Amino acid sequence: MIPKPLQRVEYFEKLGYGMFIHWGLYSLLGKGEWAQSIYKIPIEEYQKLQSRFTAEDFDGREIAKVAKQAGMKYAVLTTRHHEGFSLFDTCGLNTFDAPHSPAKRDLVADFVSGCRQEGIIPFFYHTTLDWYQSSFKDDFATYLKYLRDSVEILCRNYGEIGGLWFDGNWSKPEADWQEDELYGIIRKYQPQAIIVNNTGLEARGRTGHPEIDSVTFEQGRPEPMNREGMPKYLAAEMCQTMNMHWGISTEDFGYLSPKNIIENLCACRKVGANYLLNVGPTASGKIPDYEKAALLRAGEWVKKYDNLIRNAKPFAAYSGTNDFALELEGHIYLFIHGIVSGGDHNVAVFREKSKPVVFTGIARPIKEVRWLDSDEKVSFVQNTESAMLCMQTTPFPFGTNLVVRAARVEF
């Protein structure tokens, strides 16, 4: 038996697509978010970066506008990453925070305000691994109290938030992280918040504490969730970088294209998982031009299929390829990859006249199949006894390439 999802989990699944934002002192170095550890920068030297942190271009509303135009519904900001520097006012816990830098302001408050103005749900990332706090190594119980006090500030001072996204328990796999106490604080102040605790690259999809609401797939396409017999219905979320780093890396040129973004979003929704795509703002806090442009271009595709991306559920029809089916309000929608663009042989690189696409698992007699974008009928044959459908797709008209094209099945 599959458990019924809690209301907050069901709502989270319908958000579908979100923006991850990795930004901190490491952004000043432009070498990725792990620069302090990878390059063995002494903590005394690393702390000096705080005196250069101006955040002059950080504008929570502008970031939220980009997320909205990209078709995203929520955003997750690194309120504190492994370096231990906080973008929020730590209220006396220490002075290693944004208000005590040249920025002189609470950047989490700016982020939350901007999200609310644009209708984006704010989520908070918070590290559990901390390179700044000596107690993380020397007095773990004291460190955990500091961690809980930090999370309580985030839960109390910014109004209702979408959730908390933790990362770092994998650094001490045998430790008692006192998760009951940590999550209890969240439930006290933010009872409807989604709780995520990243299981890392080596444990994608692994379940954890009973209060966790979603499993994570870091930098890897999600697998279908087998929820049969689970004590609680869990959502799933894939988090991914635009290149090879979470924080900005000025020498990393390996960016995703709009095509990649569309394909990865589809791979997530194929199995009902959310897609959390990261941006690494510049040292001053602005989303880099290429990342913004790629997100906005992919966002034009999202708008075409927005209702399906949010609300449709995976349907058990199989193609043996990346093609997949979703179900919404009694209708089946087929998402097809790899359709080529047509045109004169002097300009069209790919000129196949048609491409057969086969699905199994659709036994109900089909009346017709139509492309959503053009309302054009798709030629097909069906064998209801074997539940097999074969569609004969034709190339896009010259000047069109949707990357993934959706068709509606009428029974």
Image: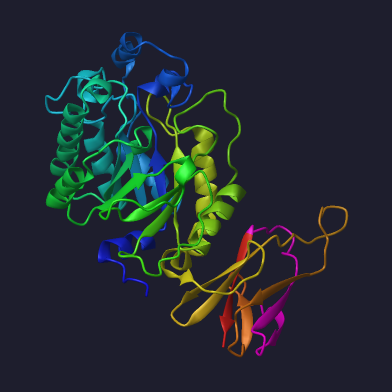
Residue 5 lies in magenta, yes or no? no
* Main secondary structure found in the magenta portion: loop
Drawn side of residue 49 relative to residue 248, left or right: left
| Residue 127 seen | yes
State the residue in front, 65 or 238.
Answer: 238
**Side of 27 relative to 43 (left or right):** right
As drawn, 278 above or below 193: above
Depth order, front residue of 382/132: 132
The residue closer to the viewer here, 373 or 15, is 15
- Which colour style is shown? rainbow
Residue lying at 44% horizontally and 34% vertically, measured from the top left: 287
Pinpoint residue 79: horizontal percent, then vertical percent: 28, 34
Rendered location of residue 164, percent (x, y): 27, 45
Residue 2 picture quarter: bottom left
Please give the name of the residue rendered at 47% of the width and 26% of the height, measured from the top-left corner. Answer: 32
Give, as a single range, the part of the protein colored magenta: 376-403
Kindly identify the residue that appears in the image at 37 percent across and 29 percent down: 285
> Does the image show residue 239?
no
List the single residue furthest toward the right: 346
Task: Classify residue 317 by image quadrant.
Answer: bottom right
The quadrant of the rendering that contains the C terminus is bottom right
| Screen quadrant of the N terminus | bottom left
**Picture coordinates of residue 361 (x, y %)?**
60, 79
User: How many numbered discs?
Assistant: 0
Query: Is residue 75 placed above or below 78 in the rendered structure?
Result: below
Instruction: Decide if residue 300 is on the left or right side of residue 337.
Output: left
Q: Position of residue 271 (x, y in %)?
A: 50, 63
In reply to whether residue 377 is colored magenta, the answer given is: yes
